[in-house]
Image (cartoon, rainbow, N blue to C red):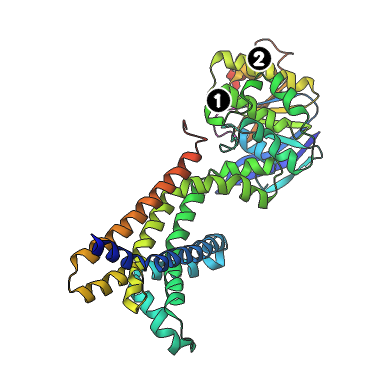
């Protein structure tokens, strides 16, 4: 029992790194995704943005992570540390998906909601902030929760470039004790607990937006 | 007062409004006509929700618009729906209580639109437009989807709006409703004005309109 607890704590040393990657990647993903979906309203940018999204969605994340980590010294002459490479790769990857989620969310808002705001002489900034976005956020919440969960699990790929996250800690423990069973189960338990936590928070937020429960 | 001069509007090169010339002064004007005749488009042009292909609409008064499907903001309560826009413009919100009272929905003040019936939503939509103190109110199909008893209420409601000195232009294909409420009825067909009458000056206006439909 004593050993199990110490193993559990050892795998948990990667928890903070995993969470930092998740939050950093998500912040970058939401900002870039928001930017992409706004730029999509500019006709000149559409082909470029569609191209970016297509390439990001069309290549494996592990490849993107390797490109960011191993190729930046050659291309840009910068040596990124593991954490920055992770944030950039995960952020870029999730921004493509988030841009698509946002686009779908905005398209579900009736054109007449925009017109209603216009007839009431509501300026564009306030219309987006107070009329359109609150409805968009409510609509995209389930899809966003999905994306956050997917991103959390994808952060485990950081172990392939040497980042010490939950996955890597479990592998280190396995290498030390010559057994995989307990370390991998513990890592799985950490990820699963985090997913349950994200789901719980998501449900709470969804319940708060009860305004059209009959609609 | 609204002055329209040779108003034309095309959708995909098909004329929806075809050389409309109209002068509308204070009154209740009913816009009748079959579906696709251009009633809603004309209202939307007056409100500047559509850009004209040619001609001009001169309108110096502030306008309000009541949408066919109301378009209340679903994430705001009735009260917030009413007061949000005036607050931004630093306009007074004093009349909101009395408006809700006079429209009979004071008790619904803190409800969300999803908890309201069709007739109640109609009242809130009307009240929301009136909060901006328009001189002209444009109503698109105010009776669609409402039952007969509620339509009677809407007639009273719109008459009380007229008593506030507000000009109204009402698009509807409910001829009985229009003849009951309007001082002037304009029948549109294929984007042209076919009939322009005062329903009080002729016998059986509904039948007269039907024969021209």
Vertical relation: B36 (above or below) A135: above
Circle nearer the N terminus (1, 2): 1
Image-based side of A85 in relation to B1, left or right = left
Q: Farthest residue toward the front?
A: A2
Chain that bears disc 2: B
Quadrant housing residue B149 = top right
Q: Which residues are magenta?
A: B33-38
Choose between B107 and B208: the one closer to the eye: B107
- The residue positioned 17% from the left and 70% from the top of the image is A179
User: Pointer 1: what residue?
Assistant: B116
User: Could you tell me residue A212's position as x and y percent?
Assistant: 50, 34
Q: Is residue B37 magenta?
A: yes
- Marks 1/2 in contact by CB < 8 Å: the verdict is no
User: Pointer 2: what residue?
Assistant: B205
The residues bearing labels 1 and 2 have C-alpha atoms spaced at a distance of 35 Å
Quadrant housing residue A100 = bottom left
Residue A32 shows in this picture: yes
Q: Main secondary structure of the magenta part?
A: loop
Vertical relation: B188 (above or below) A54: above
Choose between B62 and A65: the one closer to the eye: A65
Choose between B97 and A208: the one closer to the eye: A208
Vertical relation: A125 (above or below) B177: below
Chain that bears disc 1: B
């Amino acid at each position: 029992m004593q050993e199990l607890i110490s193993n559990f704590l050892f795998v948990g040393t990667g928890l903070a790194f995993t969470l930092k990657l998740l939050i950093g990647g998500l912040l970058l993903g939401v900002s870039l995704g928001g930017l992409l979906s706004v730029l999509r309203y500019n006709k000149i940018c559409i082909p470029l943005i569609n191209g970016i999204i297509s390439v990001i969605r069309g290549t494996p994340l592990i490849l993107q992570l390797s490109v960011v980590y191993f190729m930046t010294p050659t291309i840009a002459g910068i040596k990124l540390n593991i954490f920055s490479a992770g944030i950039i790769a995960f952020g870029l990857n999730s921004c493509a998906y988030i841009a698509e989620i946002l686009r779908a969310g905005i398209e579900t808002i009736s054109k007449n909601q925009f017109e209603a705001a216009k007839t009431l002489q509501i300026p564009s900034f306030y219309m987006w902030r107070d009329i359109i976005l609150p409805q968009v956020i409510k609509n995209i919440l389930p899809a966003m929760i999905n994306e956050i969960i997917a991103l959390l699990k994808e952060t485990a790929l950081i172990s392939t470039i040497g980042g010490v996250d939950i996955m890597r800690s479990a592998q280190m423990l396995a290498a030390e004790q010559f057994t995989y069973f307990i370390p991998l189960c513990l890592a799985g338990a950490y990820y699963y607990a985090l997913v349950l936590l994200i789901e719980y928070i998501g449900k709470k937020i969804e319940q708060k937006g009860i305004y059209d429960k009959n609609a | 007062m609204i002055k329209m001069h040779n108003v034309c509007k095309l959708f995909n090169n098909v004329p929806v409004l075809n050389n409309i010339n109209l002068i509308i002064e204070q009154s209740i004007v009913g816009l009748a006509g079959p579906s696709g005749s251009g009633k809603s488009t004309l209202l939307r042009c007056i409100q500047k929700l559509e850009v004209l292909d040619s001609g001009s609409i001169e309108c110096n008064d502030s306008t309000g618009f009541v949408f066919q499907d109301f378009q209340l903001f679903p994430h705001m309560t009735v009260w917030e729906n009413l007061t949000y826009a005036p607050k931004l413009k630093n306009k007074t919100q004093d009349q909101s209580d009395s408006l809700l009272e006079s429209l009979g929905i004071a008790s619904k003040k803190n409800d969300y639109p999803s908890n309201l019936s069709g007739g109640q939503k109609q009242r809130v939509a009307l009240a929301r437009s009136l909060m901006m103190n328009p001189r002209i109110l444009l109503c698109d199909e105010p009776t669609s989807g409402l039952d007969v008893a509620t339509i009677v209420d809407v007639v009273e409601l719109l008459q009380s709006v007229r008593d506030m000195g507000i000009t109204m232009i009402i698009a509807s294909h409910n001829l009985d409703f229009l003849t009951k409420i309007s001082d002037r009825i304009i029948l549109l067909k294929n984007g042209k004005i076919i009939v322009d009458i005062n329903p009080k000056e002729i016998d059986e206006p509904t039948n007269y309109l039907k024969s021209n439909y």
